[in-house]
Amino acid sequence: MIIINHKISSGTKKKLSRFGELMELQTQGITYSAISGHPDIFFCQSPGHLFAAPNLPEKYFKLLDDHKIRYITGELPVGGEYPATSRYNAVAMDKYLIHNFRHTDFTITRTLEDLTPVHVDQGYCRCNLLPLKDGHFITSDPGIHKVLQGLHPPAGGLHPCSLFVNSHKIKLEGFPHGFFGGCCGVLENTVFINGSLSHHPDSGQIKEYLVSLGYKIVELDEGPLTDVGGILFADR
């Protein structure tokens, strides 16, 4: 199942539906409108785990159950404003759990206690950070970029472990700009991007970085990059 913001364009939905059934996320009265359908606000995904906010509308829990997708319900609800909006916006990988741990839901840190915690000051971590294979990342947050550069040397000495990209050309409803991670999702060796990189000033660097790591790039729209809270591919 692919968890997406219900506001994604119909053309993008059609393209994504070739890769799996869509679950279109829409909430009301939980948090502010711009992020009310963002998967990365209500879910945190790690290898082997899917965490869901306890105040996710019941119909989505039923959909997950009907599709036999296992999940762990968190303790803290998503709130109306930051930092209560950032409790599930962590990045979890094979080795690292990255977030502003002043705000992380306890269920995530407790369940993933074997991962190395990496604290960053940005609560909207997954919005700003796209985790890739072999300890590589693309981020639109300079603070996260600085922390990641200090984690380990580039794998094999060939590629920087973190690529920093400009966020100012990324759209987000109601805000001056969005974040790069919120435009993207990863399925195996394919990176899906909500929009066309041709509109972004760092398009060449982004393409080169992803291709050098062995990724195929699927641009889902011809318009500018738009932050939709990520594209989440949920496994059974």
Image: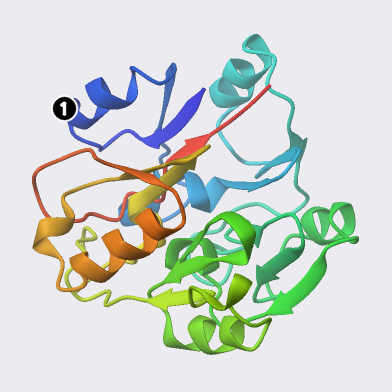
User: Where does the image place residue 171, in percent across and percent down from the top left?
Assistant: 19, 61
Q: Quadrant of the C terminus?
A: top right
User: Where does the image place residue 225, in percent across and percent down from the top left?
Assistant: 20, 56
Q: Residue at x 32, y 75 (%)?
A: 165
Q: Can you identify the residue that label 1 sits on?
A: 11
User: Where does the image place residue 66, in percent across and percent down from the top left?
Assistant: 64, 10
Within-10-Å neighbours for mark 1: few <14, some 14–19, many 20+:
few
User: Where does the image place residue 128, in percent across and percent down from the top left?
Assistant: 44, 68
Mark 1: secondary structure: helix
In depth, the one of 159 and 74 nearer the eye is 159
Image position of 57 with respect to 155: above or below = above
Q: Residue at x 77, y 37 (%)?
A: 72
In depth, the one of 37 and 140 nearer the eye is 140
Q: Is residue 91 left or right of residue 47?
A: left
Q: Residue at x 51, y 71 (%)?
A: 82
Amino acid, disc 1: Gly
Image position of 35 with respect to 48: above or below = below
Q: Is residue 219 left or right of residue 42?
A: left
